[in-house]
Amino acid sequence: MLMGLQQALAFVEKRKDLAAYFIYRKTNGQISDTASTSFLKLLNP
């Protein structure tokens, strides 16, 4: 991600035509994930 996680998530949240699911590695090496509000709505219509 060229924007970084927080900027990328903020960008997607502003765009109602986008949904995103991010998988990333934390600084401690743990794999984590997060999703935009639009993506979560796709999972629970």
Image (cartoon, rainbow, N blue to C red):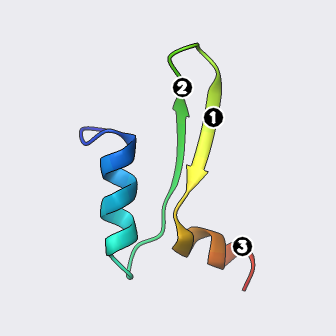
Single out the residue that lies furthest toward the top: 28
Q: Name the amino acid, label 1.
A: Ser
Q: Earlier in the sequence, mark 3 or mark 1?
A: 1
At label 2, counting other C-alpha atoms closer than 10 Å, the crowd grade (few under 14, some 14-19, many 20 or more) is: few
Badge 1 or badge 2: first in the primary sequence = 2
x and y percentages locating residue 18 in the rendered image? 40, 73
**What amino acid is found at the position of numbered circle 3 in the picture?**
Leu
Q: CA distance from mark 3 to mark 2?
A: 23 Å
The residue that appears at 63% across and 27% down in the rendered structure is 31
| Residue wearing tag 2 | 25
- Residue 26 percent coordinates (x, y): 54, 24
Do the CB atoms of the residues marked 1 and 2 lie less than 8 Å apart? yes
CA distance separating discs 1 and 2 = 6 Å
Label 1 neighbour load within 10 Å: few <14, some 14-19, many 20+: few
Q: Which mark is residue 32?
A: 1
Residue highlighted by disc 3: 43
Q: Secondary structure at mark 1?
A: strand
Relative placement, left or right, of 35 versus 18 is right
Quarter in which the C terminus is drawn: bottom right
Residue at disc 3, secondary structure: helix
Identity of the amino acid at label 2? Arg
Residue at x-position 30% and y-position 49%: 7
